């Protein structure tokens, strides 16, 4: 190791410097210098390439101060223009379209919309599939523009809030249980038919039942009996003509002489029958019909 010697002099002293002195050059020389320059050059090349790639990505992705491409960041949220494809689930609080266009949700398989609570459990689901639309929830409701409920469905009942429910199917409507409505009416110039093929048909109302045909007939057909019962009131047949064409006709010992006038007789069990009219009542003579 070479030791350097330093000599300090003053004005009053004069010392001779030694003849043999060692001189050191400070710096990087030789292959080290060339390697350093090469490393700096590589860093400059990488910096230029990164800067060019950044500019290219910004240009291709349409980055701007307001967003990226058709995706703009606003105070109200994100605004996306044009058609977009989501490969994974989309979570959002509100989705709406522009004021001058409609909102279209499209999928090759199905479209599913889920509503979750704070625990992450699904509380409502709308599934639009290729063959049917499924709705899962505690209640399903359709409202009008002014907020009036038009159609409500839950586990207990189905409520139609419109003033009129119109069924246009050729087979009508089939109800397995009771139906509550203030009015049942057919379309104009078409008949109305209430039918129970295998069971009974019952109509109940606390204040009365009104059956009316303004331009046609009213027919009640039954394979067994038709009963008209009033617990406290009377049975009133108010018409110009009342016809009972198939009442049994009482005869006297088999004579079949023609009659033009008959009187209606009533058996103790309420059965009606005809007897030939005479100067006095003849019901007693034909009472064998009640047996």
Image: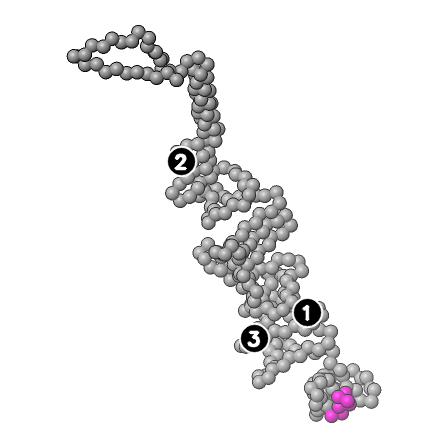
How far, Cα to Cα, is label 3 from label 1?
Answer: 19 Å
Looking at the rendering, in which quadrant would you find the C terminus? Answer: bottom right
At 60% from the left edge and 78% from the top edge, which residue is drawn?
A: 238
Q: Quadrant of the N terminus?
A: top left
Q: Quadrant of residue 287?
A: bottom right
Query: Looking at the picture, how far across and down is residue 117, in whole percent?
Result: 49, 56
User: How far across and how far down the image is residue 162, in percent?
Assistant: 51, 61
Front residue of 187/276: it is 187
Q: Name the colouring of the figure.
A: one colour
Q: Secondary structure at mark 1?
A: loop
The segment highlighted magenta reads 284-291
Q: From the viewer's perspective, is residue 226 above or below residue 5? A: below
Q: Nearer the viewer, mark 1 or mark 2?
A: 2
In this image, 145 relative to 178: left or right? left
Label 3 neighbourhood size at 10 Å, few (<14), some (14-19), many (20+)? few
Q: Are discs 3 and 1 less than 8 Å apart at CB?
A: no
Q: CA distance from mark 1 to mark 2?
A: 68 Å
| Residue under numbered circle 2 | 66
Q: Secondary structure at mark 3?
A: loop
């Amino acid at each position: 190791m070479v030791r350097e010697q330093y000599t300090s002099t003053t004005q009053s002293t004069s010392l001779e410097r030694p003849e043999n002195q060692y001189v050191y050059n400070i710096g990087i020389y030789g292959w080290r210098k060339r390697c350093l320059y090469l490393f700096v050059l590589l860093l400059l090349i990488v910096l230029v390439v990164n800067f060019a790639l950044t500019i290219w990505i910004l240009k291709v992705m349409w980055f701007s101060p307001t967003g990226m491409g058709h995706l703009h960041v606003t105070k109200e949220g994100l605004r996306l223009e044009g058609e977009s494809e989501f490969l994974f689930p989309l979570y959002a609080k509100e989705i709406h379209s522009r004021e001058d266009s409609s909102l279209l949700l499209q999928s090759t398989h199905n479209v599913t919309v889920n509503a979750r609570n704070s625990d992450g459990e699904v509380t409502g689901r709308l599934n639009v599939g290729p063959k049917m639309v499924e709705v899962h929830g505690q209640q399903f409701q359709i409202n009008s523009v002014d907020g009036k409920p038009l159609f409500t469905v839950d586990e207990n009942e189905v409520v139609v809030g419109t003033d009129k429910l119109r069924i246009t199917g050729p087979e009508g409507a089939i109800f397995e249980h009771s139906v509550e409505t203030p009015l049942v009416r057919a379309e104009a110039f078409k008949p109305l038919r209430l039918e129970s093929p295998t069971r009974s048909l019952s109509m109940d109302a606390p204040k009365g039942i009104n059956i009316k045909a303004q331009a046609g007939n009213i027919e009640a057909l039954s394979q067994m009996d038709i009963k008209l019962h009033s617990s406290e009131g009377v049975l009133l047949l108010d018409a110009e003509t009342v016809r009972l064409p198939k009442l049994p006709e009482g005869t006297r010992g088999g004579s079949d002489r023609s009659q033009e006038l008959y009187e209606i007789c009533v058996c103790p069990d309420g059965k009606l029958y005809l007897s030939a009219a005479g100067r006095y009542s003849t019901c007693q003579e034909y009472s064998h019909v009640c047996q």
